Image (cartoon, grey):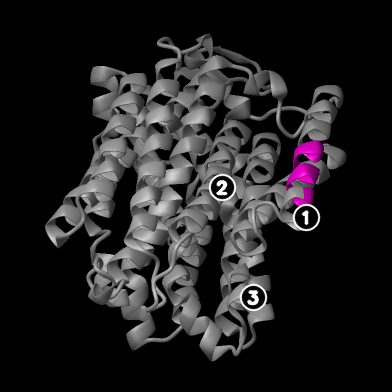
Amino acid sequence: MTTPLDRANYRVTFGVLVLGVSAYALLQSLVIPALTTIQVSMHTTQNTVTWVVTAYLLSASIFTPIMGRIGDILGKEHVMVATLVALSLGSVIAALAHSVTVLIIGRAVQGIGGGVMPLAFGIIRDEFPRERLASAIGTIAAMTAVGGGVGLIIAGPILQHLGIHWLFWIPLVMTSIAAVLTYFLVPESPERSSGRISISAALLLSAWLIALLVAVSEAPSWGWTSTKTVGLGALGLILLVVWVVVELKVDDPVVDMKMMRIPAVWTNNLVAFLFGIGMYSIMAFLPEFVQTPRAAGYGFTASTVASGVFLLPMTAGMFFVGLYSGKIANRFGSKSAVLVGSAVSAGGYGMLALAHSTSTEVYLASALLGIGLGLAFSAMSNLIVRAVPASQTGVASGMNANIRTIGGAVGAGVMSSIVTSRMLPIGAPAQSGYVHGFIFLAACTLVAVVASIFIPEAISDHEVHLNHAELAIVPGGTLTEG
């Protein structure tokens, strides 16, 4: 019989997970400020270089729920090691690339690392005492957003002093160490789900995600009403419907549709989609806004390095709120945290739309966004983990992250079209484009406020199965009170 004393100290496990998640989060955004440099140094076009981001986005969208599901079946710590190895391999390919094609391939391999998030949540649920669960999940959730912000901040100095390839060598060191430590220090999963992966369902999941995300990613350049955008988007929606039908019929679905209908799951997924629209858009467009020459009548003529500093209050806010998210959730409830976080975030976007003439105003809006995003993301992750059986933690968390990514792709595409709707003679967007774009983000987040009201107050009965430390696991796999 396994007892808590036979397991690794959960604090050690948490440190290993933070390292792996931080590396993955950095890789989400490190290359964004470097796209122009990559385009020039690798002698490619602007349309081609955007695939350095798009390939990573597509791959992560596909593999995040799939790796979560495989972890639920085979064991989360084994699959976490494999995911970190894939992330490391992709970093090696990207770091050694001297052509944009090889770099794009490396980024696609890195996208497999999207599985670290659902796997980390699953491991935390398996290993942590109940009273530590909310805080740990909140911190890990916040680290994904924090890492994205940090990536934008440090990309400039890395480019200036080390060069493009170090954008991948530095995370490689982190993921390699995390893989070794996970193998030796993270205990084997006490929770497993039966079955196997349905190949047909997995292929359909990949197909509709690719069709839909390519359509919304390329829509700003193709045109939202172009034949390619409409056709590919329609194909994605048709494949989505077929995928849902197949998932309902197969014996071993990749994503259990009954689980997706749980009120706490679908409401949080809706909020995650709306938050993804805002978070990914602001990380992409706020640096562009402050880099705009003052000759345009707005902006701060900020350098790549200086523009990252404007995101520092947001990054710090997400980090510190994430650290205290457990106490906040225990005191006020996770639903309240999502609702308040949504409202505060909407205020941040609204402030950017209405007051952005001084750096102090932008810093304040950035701080509001950090507090709101950090509070809501941490609470949503807790609600998802608590709403499903332990054997489905990986795939449920994976789909939540995936839906947030889809929201990010949609938001970035719409935001790009809004911002560039009217261009000035100097080649910069008109100020009205950014104003309307920030208002769009505020409106989406206000819808998230309304959606969060429908999140159930009570946690389902699955909460009694939160932690193996309160259960004894007999050799046959049956759970009994310990």
Q: Residue at x 55, y 80 (%)?
A: 95
User: Residue beneath label 3, please?
Assistant: 48
Viewer-nearest residue: 392 or 212: 212
Q: What x and y, as percent, mark residue 317?
A: 23, 47
* Lower sequence index among marks 3 and 1: 3
- 155 and 287: which one is in front? 287
Q: Residue at x 49, y 58 (%)?
A: 416
Secondary structure beneath dot 2 equals: helix
User: Which numbered disc covers residue 410?
Assistant: 2
Does the stretch in magenta take in 236? yes
> Which numbered disc, 1 or 2, marks the residue that appears first in the sequence?
1
Above or below for 287 versus 437: below
**Mark 1: which amino acid?**
Thr
Q: Is residue 187 visible?
A: no
Q: Which residue is mark 1?
A: 227
Mark pair 2, 3: CA separation = 19 Å
Mark 3 residue type: Thr
What range is drawn magenta here?
Answer: 231-239
Query: Tag 1: Cα neighbours inside 10 Å, few (<14), some, or many (≥20)?
Result: few
In the displayed structure, does residue 5 sit left or right of residue 221?
Answer: left
Q: Residue at x 59, y 42 (%)?
A: 402
* Whole-percent x, y for residue 196 in the image: 80, 35
